[in-house]
Amino acid sequence: MSLAIHPIRTEGDYRAALARVDALMNAEPGTPDGDHLDVLVTLIEAYEARHWPIPAPDPIEAIRVRMEQRNLHPRDLEPMIGSRGRVSEVLSRKRQLTLPMIRRLAKELDLPADVLIQETQGIPARGRDAA
């Protein structure tokens, strides 16, 4: 079987690729069908990333989700953020995360640093004029 692979440019191409992936789902890895499946999945992922990008989550929401997943309380963040007051300010969006906080949170909570670096909703960026 030859691989008839081409870029996914249109919604029709996308739907056809999804249908082909569905037909190949049980293909054995390392076989021609398995290779075809791998290539199609890569093309589909690229198309989806271009047309329906998923924005990075808000840093504070990411921290809160991780806290919930690990059954952590604000006091558990004190070694990573600082005093109880500072933790409260960060979680209530009154204080931005600093680079040292980001490093510690990324390591201890196993969160990607690029998520924590995003601007936090509701906190004005430093240096911006208040209008």
Image (tube, rainbow, N blue to C red):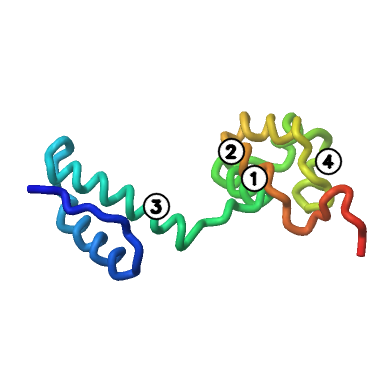
The first of marks 1 and 2 along the sequence is: 1
Nearer to us in this view, 4 or 45: 4
- In the rendering, at what x and y percent does residue 63 appear? 64, 45
Q: Earlier in the sequence, mark 1 or mark 3?
A: 3
> Circle 2 sits in a helix, a strand or a loop, which is it?
loop
Q: Is residue 79 above or below residue 32?
A: above
Residue assigned mark 4: 86
Other residues around mark 2 within 10 Å, as few (<14) / some (14–19) / many (≥20)? some
Q: Which residue is mark 2?
A: 111
State how far apart marks 2 and 3 are (Cα): 24 Å
Residue sticking out furthest to the left: 1
Residue at the far bottom: name it: 12
Cα–Cα gap, marks 4 and 2 = 20 Å
Q: Nearer the viewer, mark 1 or mark 3?
A: 3
Q: Secondary structure at mark 4?
A: helix
Element marked by disc 3: helix
- Pointer 1 residue: 63
- Report whether 18 appears left or right of 45: left
Identified at 83% across, 41% down, the residue is: 86
Badge 4 or badge 2: first in the primary sequence: 4
Q: Do residues under tags 1 and 2 come within 8 Å of each other at their CB atoms?
A: yes
Looking at the image, is mark 1 or mark 2 nearer the viewer?
A: 2
The residue lying at 74 percent from left, 29 percent from top is 79
Badge 3 amino acid = Ala
- Give the percent coordinates (x, y) of residue 58: 65, 53
